[in-house]
Amino acid sequence: MKGGVRMLIAGSIAGCVAAPALAAEEHLKLLDEQCGVQLAMSAAQCACIAEKAAEMNDRQQALVAAMVMKNIQLASQLQLDMPMPDLAAAGNFMASVPMQCAGQ
């Protein structure tokens, strides 16, 4: 069952990448929903992460969502077509924002 949920979520992210107009909202929703499960953070901490993620573009959000879900295959796929500044922004986000929000 868990694998099916991950596939559904991965499909949602992949679909969002193909449809940028919907991407930001979907990625933020996935981040908020999966943050507590995958990162073992509180609702307030996850809201902090989603709020900060809202400042990124849809490509960066898609990659961060894939990383939070620990979907290495999807993250690798997204990175292939991503410009270096977007890769750096997503990496910096994952390296700093969860720690910043942990104090919430």
Image: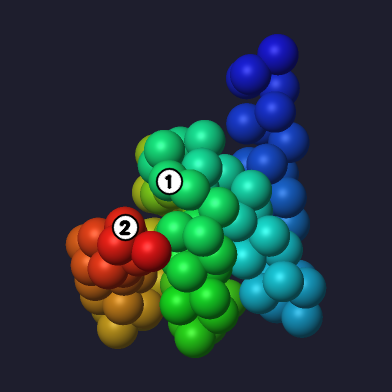
Residue 3 x/y as whole percent:
62, 20
Q: Is 26 left, or right, of 76 in this rendering?
A: right
Q: Residue at x 63, y 42 (%)?
A: 10
| Residue depicted at 62% across the width and 66% down the height | 28
- Left or right of 81? Residue 90 is left
Locate the N terminus by quadrant.
top right
Q: Residue at x 77, y 73 (%)?
A: 22
Query: Which percent across, then down, holds residue 102?
Result: 31, 57
Q: Is residue 7 above or below residue 83?
A: above
Q: Image quadrant of residue 45?
A: bottom left
Mark 1 = which residue? 41
| Cα gap from disc 1 to disc 2, whole angstroms | 7 Å
Residue 94 in view in this figure: no
Q: Amino acid at mark 2?
A: Ala
**In this figure, which residue is indicated by the disc labeled 2?**
102
| Image position of 72 (left or right of 31) | left
> Can residue 43 be seen from the camera position used here?
yes
Mark closer to the chain start, 1 or 2 = 1
Q: Residue reaching furthest top?
A: 1
Q: Amino acid at mark 1?
A: Met
**Quarter where residue 21 is shown:** bottom right
Placement of 71 over or under 78, stated as above or below: above
Q: Are the residues tagged 1 and 2 within 8 Å (C-beta)? A: yes
Number of other residues with Cα within 10 Å of mark 2, as a class: few under 14, some 14 to 19, many 20 or more: some
- Percent of width and height locating residue 67: 40, 49
Residue 104 percent coordinates (x, y): 38, 64
